[in-house]
Image (cartoon, rainbow, N blue to C red):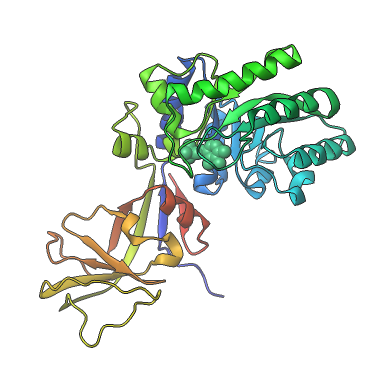
Amino acid sequence: MYKKPGYPKLIIDLQKLRTNIDKVQNACRAQGVEIAGVIKGCTGLGPCAMQYERAGCAYIASSRLEQLEPLKEMGIQAPLMMVRVPMLSEVEDVVRICEYSLNSEVEVLKALNAHARIQDKEHNVILMADCGDLREGFWDKEEMVEVAVMVEQDLHNLHLAGVGVNVGCYGSIMATPEKLQELVTVAEAIENRIGRELEIISGGATSSLMRVIDENLPSRINMLRVGEGILLGYDLPHLYNYEIPGMYQDAFKLRAEVIEVKTKPSHPVGEIGFDAFGHRIQYEDRGMRRRALLGIGKCDYGDPDELICCEPGAQVLGASSDHTILDIEDCERDIRVGDIIEFDIKYATLVYITNSNNTEMVFI
Ligand SMILES: *Cc1c(COP(=O)(O)O)cnc(C)c1O
């Protein structure tokens, strides 16, 4: 039988991941904020999820039920949270698998309630407000308050745990103090109507960590759902110049094997048409250059421009489905067939590579 080769390999340093969880969690707790550890970025890998549990995260979250389902059996006791508003067709499983879900549709809430009754459970819901990022959530805040009152009064197998917002996803909206205060305003309108405090006011994701670092998060925000900012910690320092000291950006490293090394022209030879993906590409002519071909491609990681090559002097030229082409003319190392090239990765690459059944995951 065909056996997976040793490469591509994703090297996952669980100690570094744990350090990242601790650093972010400590920074948040100093501001009275608990975190939901969002594990969808690494496709919910069990050993990674375990680190969030051991670190004592208040919640473990994903956008995909199939990533959350195995966690209880692995011994994870933290409440599980579904962060993508549920499909109507999956509410039964949402109630079965998760203690919490984020919601924005009355019809889905009623279905959750019905299934919670059948399963003899109380399911916790967080209602999402759309404050301008234009992905999920109630745009009409009066409607949101009415729905909250309905959950509180009529849907007896649901518990209205709180409200949340998402920013910096589709609409690239920044988590400013004013923007997050909009959520607090809706929360307080709901509290006035239901006559009690909401337990959770969830003020966004990694991009809201900027407010934790600046210590200007509105005081009533008490929960953030953090994915990228823990797994990789790349976006905040590189996009916004915000840093939590002591974070590792290389808890995940990608390794691929060299399958060809040759000196070739840098400009394709012949009549130029389209590449394997139907795109017209501009090729720079730098004369004859030494190139290495790797046994990994777009099928595995998506976009080659997202890869950060750790080999000094090497440059990613491009890729097809199963090949990646490097310029190695300026490398100090004499790269040979069979050698291994290492990459640091960003969020999209991590998502693709952990979904690729062609890549071996190695935990250290
Ligand atoms: C993915 C997701 C998160 C985590 O986002 P990061 O930017 O990776 O921190 C939080 N909330 C929701 C609703 C999400 O879908």
Q: Is residue 27 visible to us here? A: yes
Pick whichever, 91 or 344, lies toward us. 91
Identify the residue at image location x=42%, y=60%. Answer: 301
Number of marks drawn? 0
Tell me where residue 113 sits by quadrant. Answer: top right
- Outermost residue on the bottom side: it is 270
Pick whichever, 44 or 275, lies toward us. 275
Tell me where residue 239 sits by quadrant. Answer: top left
Please state, as top left, top right, bottom left or bottom right, where the C terminus lies in the image.
top left
Residue 161 location in percent, x, y?
A: 69, 24
Image position of 292 with respect to 152: above or below: below
Identify the residue at image location x=46%, y=21%. Answer: 28
Pick whichever, 253 or 64, lies toward us. 64
Please state, as top left, top right, bottom left or bottom right, where the N terminus lies in the image.
bottom right
Residue 230 location in percent, x, y?
A: 44, 35
Tell me where residue 327 sits by quadrant. Answer: bottom left
Residue 353 location in percent, x, y?
A: 46, 56
Image position of 271 with respect to 293: above or below: below
- Relative side of 97 to 219, left or right: right
Image position of 208 with respect to 339: above or below: above
Q: Is residue 38 visible to us here? A: no
Residue 261 location in percent, x, y?
A: 22, 74
- Relative side of 97 to 50, left or right: right
- Relative side of 297 to 76, left or right: left
Pick whichever, 342 or 108, lies toward us. 108
Identify the residue at image location x=31%, y=58%. Answer: 305
Identify the residue at image location x=79%, y=39%. Answer: 112
